Image (cartoon, rainbow, N blue to C red):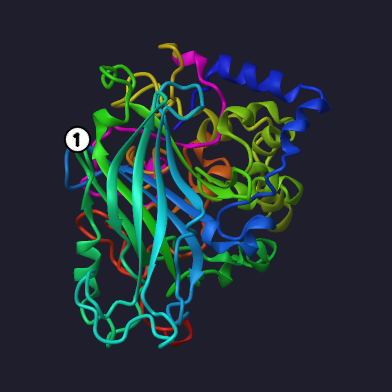
Amino acid sequence: MELRINRRALIGLGVAAALTASSLALLRTDSGNASSHREAPAIAGDPRNDNTDVYAFVSPDKAGTVTLLSNWIPFQEPQGGPNFYTFDTKSRYNIKIDNNGDAKPDITYQWTFRDEDRRGTDTFLYNNGPVTSLDDRNLLFRQRYTLKRIAHGRSTTVVSNGVVAPSHVGAASMPDYGTLRSQAVTDVRGGGKAFAGQSDEAFFLDLRVFDLLYGGDLSLVGQDTAKGYNVSTLGLQVPVEDLVLKGDAKRNPVIGVWSTTDKFNGQRHVQVSRLGNPLVNEVVAPAGLKDAFNALRPDQDAGVPALVKRVTDPEVARLLQSIYGIKAPPTPRNDLVQIFLTGVAKGNGPIAADLNALSLNKDVHGVRPAEMLRLNTAVPPAKDPDRLGVLAGDLQGFPNGRRLGDDVVDIALQAVAGAARTGKLVPGLTDKVDANDKPFGQAFPYIPLPSNVAVNQR
């Protein structure tokens, strides 16, 4: 599969890459921030504001809707009481949508939280008996949330008193956690559903990639590092027409998706977390850019030459060549520019012009390079999804959005090795973790129920 490159977008990238060092002022931010699976120094000590993964896909069981999921608070040990895991009541949690290609949020769904704590000074327990419903008096702590939709300068409350599904304490405390999960799914004003609560960590991968790319021996891979851990999920299922440009779904049904956390620093809210495509800050941005990357808006990305260069000349490609002898494709890596910064230009197949390039001002050549997850909402759900997504010919998979079952580590490794350019997979280049340890649900929010068994007992 040849990925045809958008020439004007790449010229824009070339101009950005030629900017003077003054552009690095964008990286000198006062917010002191970071994001994702502990991949940036600052956020490693602030897990409640640590955004871990974003998923965006056409809902497989509900035509005409898109499901958006974003996770926070990584590596939750299920037995981590007595306070367990809560959203930060002083922060704003956002899922943002760009639908016109300017890399700025046209729509923001924003959650804010408040605590209801009835424990007082009489008990250390999270609950003092079996919890069979979200309003059970035995549940001594819970959170509620307000969800707003912000578009065109107007803020509308679409959920006013949502209840967060509690942490899964255990079978004695919550004998039917599935019922609690179901009760936490609520209707969204204007159409759709929302969810907030604990879930299984559905990102399956062998994180020993940081040990010099699996210790220099790919025969040792195959351990799902995230198995048994939980995360905290915010989810939406909304009609496609609520996300794409009004009356514009047939012209370009592509949306850009990313999530952020805004933390109150005593004076104002500042962005301390940003996430779009998986693994970008972890293995693309160098250590010196990691905190700063998470302060940036997507529309600022192309103005940071040091960041653009990490895409056009990726470090992982050089490591694959030096450690495993896998020859890296020549630079500049315009194929990776499409995957991470502009969207993929297909040029043939069911999508006539582009797979998920997000056009600006009705000109598909006017894409503003920006790191975000891009989803073509017109591509229907695959009847037989392939974990390797677009690289395997499954156009509904990553990097066209991201489904829960997409094997993004293998996809990313193969793409960096040149598979998106050659159309051929590199044999043996895999972390051998091909699926999540728990099955996904058949209805919203799809992500599995959280585990209640200690990780070291699994």
Looking at the picture, how far across and down is residue 382, in whole percent? 25, 43
Q: Nearer the viewer, residue 246 or 330?
A: 246
Q: Residue 27 vs residue 261: left or right?
A: right
Classed neighbour count for the residue bearing mark 1: other residues with Cα under 10 Å, few (<14), some (14–19), many (≥20): some
Residue 450 visible in the displayed image: yes
Task: Please tell me which residue is depicted at 28% across the width and 48% down the height of the picture.
Answer: 160
Looking at the picture, how far across and down is residue 132, in whole percent? 19, 77
Q: Nearer the viewer, residue 79 or 420?
A: 79
Q: Quadrant of residue 174?
A: bottom left
Q: Residue 227 vs residue 210: left or right?
A: left
| Residue 340 is one of the magenta-drawn residues | no
Looking at the picture, how far across and down is residue 358, in whole percent? 43, 24
Q: Residue 97 vs residue 305: left or right?
A: left
Q: Quadrant of residue 213?
A: bottom right
Residue 315 visible in the displayed image: no
Task: Please tell me which residue is depicted at 77% across the width and 32% down the height of the picture.
Answer: 24
- In the rendered structure, which amino acid carries the disc numbered 1? Gly
On-image quarter of the N terminus: top left
On-image quarter of the C terminus: bottom left
Q: Which residue is mark 1?
A: 64
Whether 454 is drawn above or below 434: the answer is below
The number of numbered discs placed on residues in the rendered structure image is 1
Q: Residues in magenta?
A: 364-392
Task: Please tell me which residue is depicted at 23% across the width and 36% down the height of the picture.
Answer: 380
Looking at the picture, how far across and down is residue 415, in whole percent? 53, 43
Instruction: Examine the residues drawn in magenta and state their main secondary structure.
Output: loop
Q: Quadrant of residue 7?
A: top right
Whether 215 is drawn above or below 287: the answer is below
Mark 1 falls on what kind of element? loop
